Amino acid sequence: MSDRDQIGQLEGRLSDRAVVTDPALLESYLHDEAEWAAYGKPVAVVRAGSTADVQETVRWALEHRVPVVPRGAGTGLSGGANALEGCVVISLEKLNQVLEVNPLERLAVVQPGVVNDDLRKTVATQGLWYPPDPASSPWSTIGGNVATNAGGVCCVKYGVTRDYVIGLEVVTGTGEVVRLGRRTAKGVAGLDLVGLFVGSEGTLGIVTEITVKLRPLPDPGRTVLGYFDGIVDAGVAVRDVAARGLTPSALELVDRTCLLAVDEMTHMGIASEANVVLIGKVDEPGEAGKRAAEEMVAAFEAGNATFVAETADPEEADAMMAARRLAYPAMERLGPLLTEDVCVPKEHVPEMLRRVERIAADSDITIATVAHAGDGNLHPLMITGRGDDEAKARAQAAFDRIIEEALDLGGTVTGEHGVGLLKMPGVARELGPEVLAMERAVKQALDPEGTFNPGKVF
């Protein structure tokens, strides 16, 4: 059977116009935001309109031994959603409905194509909150967040995606549809297969429905803004926040290179006042919140802040956090980015920032840094000119050195972006051969034909 006949057979099994083969349209599904990760050309993209479309595509792929790459919004930064040569990409963008919000049980049931911020806005109308909030929350989808176990700004206090997902509908590696997890507040029957799938990066099955826990909307809280001359000073302040026993609801770092890029894009004017900015938030109500903000001010001052201010004005706080969220898209305008995602113990944040500075100097490349600093999750961004292969090689070497330094400090190669393609050598060093063998055994058990996202993560 020819490729065209095989695709025609697939079209006949799916909803109308689900299969895309137009080369011009395929271009937008080739890769995610990890510009440096390899990708191939798919034979087709399936824009699934239902769980049945996903199931039929997987069954067709099993029959014809075609690899399958699941894809959400394509905002990933590790190459996890990159197409493979000859694969079928299953896009979940059309599965974008919030199916249920239950205020009594404090849960929501959503399809994987629901945008993170859209879910947050929907549940907020009922006084509820979905905490995981990657910086890409205005664009990234819940399905993609589940795939990478995404973190974000609030996760220093409230945890990552895995802490909120309690149930999944999944199309398996044998083409079956199964439900995992629960809707109850407690449940200990069997292995935690939900937790296993969250963070599996599309290698074990395709998630078609997600049940998440919700929390009551928090107090708007207070924001402490600190300006620093040096990034290591800001790291000292981050360490001191933890040493004082504070658990901020956010503690974000943005360096001068990122501030300049944001200013160029938005004309906010922040870079005229600071080399490095720390944005700290506390959300305890009343006097407890006031005391926590005062302690954070003291921690910033201990890090030699050149300016510290505390505000309870939500609009002012939102403007500063918006600048933080815009750091990555602002930097993309400057040239190809190679994005790190290491996480180190909080006590080592100053030292890790110092090492990144040294690596930038040794490599003679620009490394800008943003960070979910409160939980030690650093995002050094390596920038090169377009078409500068020699600089790109130096940046790749710097990328590898940053991973080595993070591991040396007891850290991990990824705090939230996932392994994908870019972090496979690093995760092999972090986990070691025995643990990798265990993970590959799980992959083999749940995806016996190796259909889902082959050649990635493991």
Image: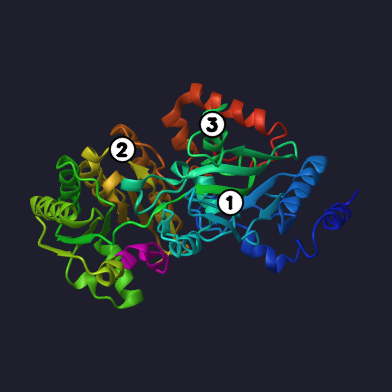
Q: Is residue 26 left or right of residue 458?
A: right
In percent of the image, x 32 and y 67: which residue is there? 323
Which of the two discs, 3 and 1, sits closer to the camera? 3
Give the image quarter of residue 230.
Answer: bottom left
Label 3 or label 2, whichever comes before in sequence order: 3
State the separation of the CA atoms marked 1 and 2.
27 Å
Give the image quarter of residue 64.
Answer: top right
In percent of the image, x 38 and y 50: which residue is there? 394
Q: Are marks 3 and 2 in contact (CB under 8 Å)?
A: no
Is residue 323 part of the magenta span, yes or no? yes
Span shown in magenta = 321-333
Task: Kindly identify the amino acid type of the residue bearing the numbered disc 1.
Answer: Ala
Task: Kindly identify the amino acid type of the residue bearing the numbered disc 2.
Answer: Glu
Q: Which mark is residue 81?
A: 1
Is residue 342 part of the magenta span, yes or no? no
Residue to which mark 2 is pinned: 405
Magenta: main secondary structure equals helix
Q: Which mark is residue 192?
A: 3
Label 3 or label 1, whichever comes before in sequence order: 1
Which of the two discs, 1 and 2, sits closer to the camera? 1
Q: Position of residue 225 (x, y in %)?
A: 19, 62
Seen as rendered, the residue at the extreme front is 104
Seen as rendered, the residue at the extreme bottom is 267
State the separation of the CA atoms marked 3 and 1.
25 Å
Count of residue discs: 3
Which of the two discs, 3 and 2, sits closer to the camera? 3
State the separation of the CA atoms marked 3 and 2.
33 Å
Seen as rendered, the residue at the extreme right is 1
